Each structure stands twice: as structure tokens, then as C-alpha cells.
Image (cartoon, grey):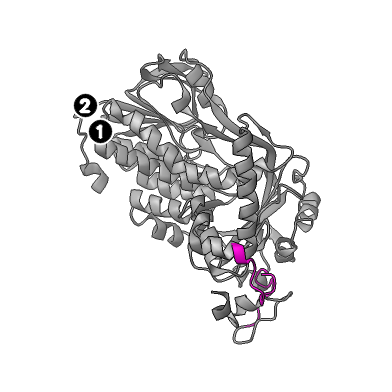
Amino acid sequence: MASQNRTSPAGRPTTALVLGGGLAGLLAAYELAPYVDSVTVVDRGHRHGPGAGPAPDEPALMLHAAGARALEELHPGILDELVAAGAHRLGMTTDMAILTLRGWLAHGCDAGFVLTCTRGLARRVVRERALRPGNITVLENTEAVSLTGDSYVLTGAVVRDRASGRMRRLDAGIVVDATGRGKGVTRRISELGLPPVPVDSLDGGIAYATRTFRLAPHIAAGRPAVHIQPDPTNDSRGGTLLPVEGDRWMATLVGMRGTEPPLDEEGFMAYAARLRDPALVELLAGAEPLGPVQGRQHLVNRRVHLKWLPRIPKGLVLVGEAETCFNPVYGYGASTTAMAVLALRRGLARHGTGDKLTLRVRRDIAKATQPAWGTSSPGERRHPGTVATMRPGRAALAVMRFLGRYTDRVLRAGGSRPAATRALVEIITLSRTPAALLTPPVLLAALRGPADDARPATPPPATPAAPGTPATPTRPVAAHQTGEREHQTH
């Protein structure tokens, strides 16, 4: 393995401790292994032993284009391995219809893609690769209790065996916290004698419900993936239907405070029927449920800002949802995790395990996850029920309102103006930052608005035509989608 040939420029062998055994923890452990004598991964679950499997309430994993490229750089060949194991590569918007706040994006744009599968499959494939180095040990059914050291230097952590309750101290020169969504990481840092950790949180009362189906054969044949974004200013309901391995599809419904999706079978379908567009519920017609409705409520977007502390303990790195966690409707967790761990790899290559490592890597990780935060957070701020810990000042609020109105114009143009469609797809897939909306072609598309000769874009038909016959959609297809007047929309 190429990564095993890397050596630490600092030449200082040490130990590393990774708190969390999910994707973020496994990926980080693999990157640390060549630079230290040993890596210990603390995993609070039994996800990898006999009978283990993904949590039943988890929606499908989405790996956006930028995240997929980062994962491939970390583990060459892994994307092909995931696809061979049953993952699906969906082009946006060639294979996946997207309903934004202001209409369907034009079908046929090839500017980005997303890889979809169950989280269990992704963990299995990543784990098999990540644990190849012989100096990595996984402690299952074990959880982090506290960090050891002080506000200047970390020395390790205290962990507890969840079965016996026995606690022990694990010493380490580097501690990577990958424990995921929740306030545990900020509590542990504050216990070192530092003031409360600054956190930018957006609590819109996000909740989701998910269920696995086998679609009717005539519908599944059309690969009808669909993503309906919630409109936080109106009906804050949204949903996705994504293919996963094993000829299965996962439907996930998302709502904000006051419109939380129910977790019963009848309520699930009734909620799907009340989305802004009937596309998702139409695709579920005749589908066979393969399990109960599962879900979670009271999810909060959180971004931890260590840089705002008076000092940051040396040896501490946050990755994955311990650093930034997102509204699940966007599915950015896996992508930003891969991008953050890629920043960790590059930091290790430049600085080894020396004192400069954690300071530089923390900055680079925050930079890697900022585009996803900038893409997902503005919509949630527009929901009247959202509670934010950090409120912008008057000037910033005025700028945000202006940008919100401008973005609405770009979204409207995205149904028929290729420049707007391409920029939006590249931003959604994290290939470009939201600043791409300010390029001259997109500014012109927003100024011109929807093409005069294009009817509103619609999703692909729920019932595909028989092979060799023209499609007969259940609703009209926009002229620009048929290619009839494509030259007029450029």
C-alpha cells in the first residue's frame, strides 16, 4: 500500500487514539497508522462483529462528487469496489430528478454525480481497507468518557466498557474525535479547563423518517431517483427516493419544526402524498415495504469553532460530524468526512506528528467542510421556527436577504438555463463553492430568468415506456428536456 511508505518528517513515533468507529474514525485511523507506533479506535457499537449491521433508522448514504473524489484519493479503487458491491452511481440530473425551492432542475445536466448505498455497505468496504495496517486495534462496545491532559496539551482519554462499566485510561500523543453528532465533544473539551466551546448551531426541528422498499418492476426499471428539497419558507416537507444495493430503494421523508414526518406506516405514506410534488409518492405506488418505518427527531445543524477558543490543546483533531453535522436532507456527512480526512492526510504528509500538525489540520478541515455548511445552512435560517445560537448583525442579515433573493432567481433559471443548472449541480455535489453563483454566465442566466420558450421542468415519468417505444410521461415534459429547443436555451 502506498500509504504504508509514508514516514513522519518529525521522526517522532507515538500513539494515536481515535474516538469513534464509524466512517470518519476508520478513515482517520488508516491515515494515522504509518506515522505512529499504534492506533486505537474506540467504537461504542458492535457494528463489525457477528450479526452486526447498520442502525435501522439510518437513511441511505449519499457520497457527492467531491466527496467521492476525496475517498478515491484516500483509497484508490474504492468507488469501483462499492459499485461492484451494489452501490449506484447517479448522475445529477441525468439519473436523479431534483426539485429545488423554485422548481425542478433541467433534466440531462452531466455536471455532477452522487454514489448511493446503505451505510452498512460503505462501513464494511471502508473497514476492510482501513484496518489492513497491523498496528490498528479496535475496542468495540467502548465509549469515550473524558479527555486527559489540560488546556495546553492532550495526553489521551478515559474510556468505558459499556458491558462491564470498567473504565481505563488510554494515553496518546494525538486524539482524533470522530464521535459524530451530539454535544459530547464540546463537553469533553470544556472539561479541560477551557471556556465553553463556540458552536454555530441551527435548530430547525429537523426530523426524518425512512423506509426500505422494493419498487414495482416497471417503475424500478426507469431508475427513478428523486430528491425534493423542503421549502423552509412555506411547506417545510421534503423527501428522497434512492437506490441501494440488493434491488432495494430507500425513501426518506424530512420535515422541520411543525411538520415532522410520522413513524407509522399509514402516516408515512400520507406524509409523502403531501409533499410539494407527487413524484415520490407516485413512484412508491405498488412498492413492497421491506421493513418498518424508522427515524430520528430533533436533529440540529452544528459547527464547532475551536479557532475561537483562547487556546486549543495540542494533539486534538475533530473530523466528521464531531466537527460539523448537517441537515440530513442534504446527505453531506459522508462527503465532508472524506474531504476532512483528506485534509488530515495532507497535513500528516507535510508536518508528520509534530506540534504544527493539529493546528494546521484543524484549519484545513474547517476549510474543507465550509462549502457544505454554506450550501445547507442558508435555507434552514429562512425557516421561521429555526433557533440559531449565532445571529448575524444587521449588515450581514441584509446581505443574506439579498443573496437569498438572488439565489431564488438562479433556482428559477435552473429549470431551463444550462449555465444556472450546471452551477447549481456543481454546488450541490460540492464540486464548487456557492461563490459559483456569482460568475458572469450564472449572473446573466439569473438576470434573464427562465427561458421564454420552455415550460416548467418536470421529473422523469413514473412509468417508463416499454423498450423501443417513445416515452409516455404521466405529466408534460419541458421542451428543453426533450432536446427540441436545446440550442435556444444556451
Residue lying at 68% horizontally and 59% vertically, measured from the top left: 102
Residue picked out by circle 1: 352
Q: Residue 45: x, y in percent?
A: 52, 34
Do tag 2 and tag 1 residues touch (Cβ < 8 Å)? yes
The magenta region covers: 447-466
304 lies above or below 312:
below
* Residue 465 colored in magenta in the image: yes
130 lies above or below 187:
below
Q: Quadrant of residue 346?
A: top left
For residue 459, side relative to residue 266 (left or right): left
Marks 2 and 1 sit apart, C-alpha to C-alpha, by 8 Å
Q: Residue 260: x, y in percent?
A: 75, 43
2 vs 1, front mark: 1
Foreground of the two, 420 or 349: 420
Q: Can residue 119 be seen by looking at this rendering?
A: yes
For residue 12, side relative to residue 197 (left or right): left
Residue picked out by circle 2: 12
Secondary structure beneath label 2:
loop
Q: Main secondary structure of the magenta part?
A: loop
Counting residues from the N terminus, which is met first, the one under dot 2 or under dot 1? 2
Identified by mark 1, the residue type is: Gly
Secondary structure beneath label 1:
loop
Q: Residue 425: x, y in percent?
A: 53, 60
Identified by mark 2, the residue type is: Arg
